[in-house]
Image (cartoon, rainbow, N blue to C red):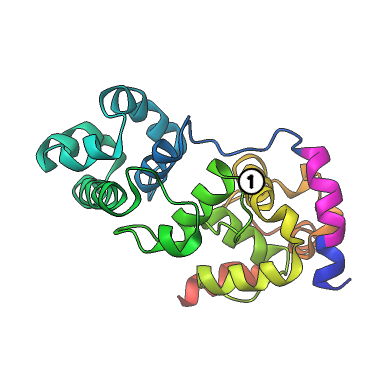
Amino acid sequence: MTARERVSQLVEALPEVYPGAHCELDFKTPLQLLVATILSAQCTDKRVNMVTPKLFARYRTAAEFATVRQETLEQEIRSTGFFRNKAKSIRAAAAAIEAQHGGKVPDSMGALHALPGVGRKTANVVLGNAFGKDEGIVVDTHVARLSQRLRLTKQTDAEKIEADLMKLVPRKHWTVWSHWLIWHGRRRCFARKPDCRQCEILRLCPSGKVFIRTGEARPPSEAAAEASA
């Protein structure tokens, strides 16, 4: 089975396994999703969702995020980790949104990516989930791991993985594709001990079949790659 054929079957199978797959960051506006996504770097969505209710109640506009004192914001987001850099990114992005876009989060890849502290991954999250625009594929640790295990890419760099996936996955599925893989990575295809025997898409996963056959905790090639890293 080719990678394209595998993807064709996965886009049929995954919606049945995860019919409610969605972004697990809580938000009501594009600005809230942008802030939550910045906070989610090296942090769980669950932890971010514990922090944002009070944050969003206190700061409702880009101007309010832009003008809050650095030290104050740092303390309010401290539990998400890397709080100094995150606070700096949020304030800088908000200031640019206020100054250059009239206080409204822009809805294009170019404009979002140009904001301070906003990379392509964050821009993809906002575009796909706040604006319903399939401009790219979010590649987080789960999407990267599963894309490799499903033999859809040999790349390790996030943007190169995204480029490979965009060639294989129909554009209308770009946003939800990430949700499917993230949900599967969190619920079944764990980093250390993937639950291959219970996997709903085992028949479409070359790595899972190797795991079942060898009894290894992970496919041997993946474990060897990590050991040599």
Query: In front here: 93 or 163?
Result: 93
Q: In the image, what residue type sits under mark 1?
A: His
Decide if residue 122 is on the left or right side of residue 161. left
Question: Residue at coordinates 25% horizontally, 36% vertically from top-left?
Answer: 77
Query: In front here: 104 or 182?
Result: 104
Dot 1 corresponds to which residue?
A: 179
Question: Residue at coordinates 33% horizontally, 27% vertically from top-left?
Answer: 56
Q: Is residue 139 magenta?
A: no
Q: Position of residue 175 (x, y in %)?
A: 64, 51
Neighbourhood count class around disc 1 (C-alpha, 10 Å): few under 14, some 14–19, many 20 upward: many
Q: Position of residue 20 (x, y in %)?
A: 71, 33
Question: Residue at coordinates 27% horizontally, 44% vertically from top-left?
Answer: 81
Question: Residue at coordinates 26% horizontally, 24% vertically from top-left?
Answer: 58
In terms of secondary structure, where does tag 1 sit?
A: helix
Please identify the quadrant where the N terminus is shown: bottom right
Q: Position of residue 117 (x, y in %)?
A: 31, 58
Q: Which range of residues does the magenta coloring cover? A: 8-17
**Up/down of 78 relative to 122, above or below:** above
Q: Is residue 10 magenta?
A: yes
